[in-house]
Amino acid sequence: MPPLRVAVIGAGAFGRNHLRVYRELELAHPELVLLTALVEPDAGRRNSFAATYNIPTFATLAELLNAKLHLDAASVCVPTIHHAAVAEQLLLTGLDLLIEKPFAATLADADRILELSTALNRIVAIGHLERFNPAVTATLAELNQPMFFEAHRLSIFTPRSLDVDVVLDLMIHDLDIVLSLTNSPVREVRAVGLPVLSLKTDIANVRVEFDSGCVANFTASRVSTEQVRKLRLFQPHQYLSLDFARQELLTISVDPSVVAAAMAATAVAGSPPNPAPTPTAATHPTAPHSTAPNEPSTPAAAVHPTAGLSLTKADIPKGEPLRLELENFLHAVQTRTQPRVPAEAGRAALSLALAINDQIAAHAHRTGLL
């Protein structure tokens, strides 16, 4: 099978990284992919990347399509408002696509691309690259019944991506991940947000309740003084803390026998609860329980100051999420299988993000901020 011939459409903040990773993959696996072309309207960037990657470059999509380069796939990295128009032209020429997040500017645009890709039997993946963060992969293995999420995504202000608000720019990463982890319809959305340094919402706080009873709080800011990308979740007898930037997962687990003993003690009428037992080998395991033969060993659980609690830091092999994302996309194209983040998932995240923006607008109207 010949390598997949891939083009990158747009060489802005995202597109230039797609170019870099495709070339790295080409050098490592020349049988898998061939970086074939770039579309970029800015002449300076176009000429620079033409020299760097030694590939044909074009000022417009029409020029690329007229060149008849026999492409197989493309990364769509243009501003969000152009996603649907660009994707439609590429799909009609028979290409499979990876569309950077958010999927589209409107649900109508997203639905049009979904319908067209289905009719043409084309693969469309959406670029929610945090799904490929190794810490998220590790979290999936620990998941049982999440009941509360708290997400913080804070960034220092830059002029990048000001065509969308902070919900579609930053928060949508966490919306997509929580939707995938809860696997439950949204029941209620409450939100507040404000523009600070741009004409669109730059900081937002959101509360989402799901039909399962799970609740998620999201905070996103692109006017912070620090960079924070963290997600915490609570489920029965367990608390997980995920750091996207460090690719780390910290788990605090509760020994159910200690909880049962404490509850039994409080049930004795007129008697105060018994003091917490001194940590022992039974209540304080020094290593997580192995559930499979030949399972790789993980670091020993740390001693937690509270009896009955064990703290474990997952042993996570590091990896670049974008490279993992593009590898998954190329594999899906080669094998004609569904990518990890299909168009339907991108639409779900977009739908929730737009519902949040509606609530932000409604709150601003009620409080006289509009």
Image (cartoon, grey):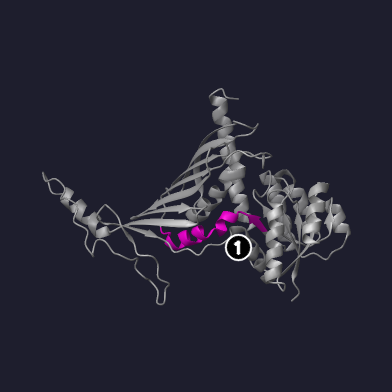
Q: Residue at x 70, y 59 (%)?
A: 20
Asked whether residue 71 appears in the rendered view, the answer is: yes
Q: Is residue 162 above or below residue 284?
A: above
Q: Quadrant of the N terminus?
A: bottom right
In the displayed structure image, the side of residue 152 where residue 166 appears, left or right: right
Q: Position of residue 186 (x, y in %)?
A: 51, 46
Relative to 321, say whether 223 is above or below.
above
Q: Is residue 41 visible?
A: no
Question: Which residue is drawn at the image coordinates 58% and 43% (left, top)?
Answer: 353
345 within the magenta span: no
The residue positioned farthest toward the right in the image shown = 66
136 within the magenta span: yes
- Residue farthest to the left? 270
Q: Is residue 45 left or right of residue 145?
A: right
Magenta: main secondary structure: helix
Q: How many other residues sit within 10 Å of disc 1, few (<14), some (14-19) or many (≥20)? A: some
Q: Residue at coordinates 72% horizontally, 48% vertically from top-left?
A: 12
Residue type, numbered disc 1: Leu
- The answer to whether 241 is drawn above or below residue 69 in the figure is above
Residue numbers of the magenta segment: 125-144
Q: Secondary structure at mark 1?
A: helix
List x then y, in percent, for residue 241: 42, 52
240 to the left or right of 115: left
Query: In which quadrant will I find the C terminus?
Result: top right
Instruction: Residue under label 1, please give it.
Output: 324
Residue lying at the far top in this picture: please name it.
368
Q: Quadrant of residue 162?
A: top right
Q: Which residue is nearer to you in this view: 221 or 208?
A: 221
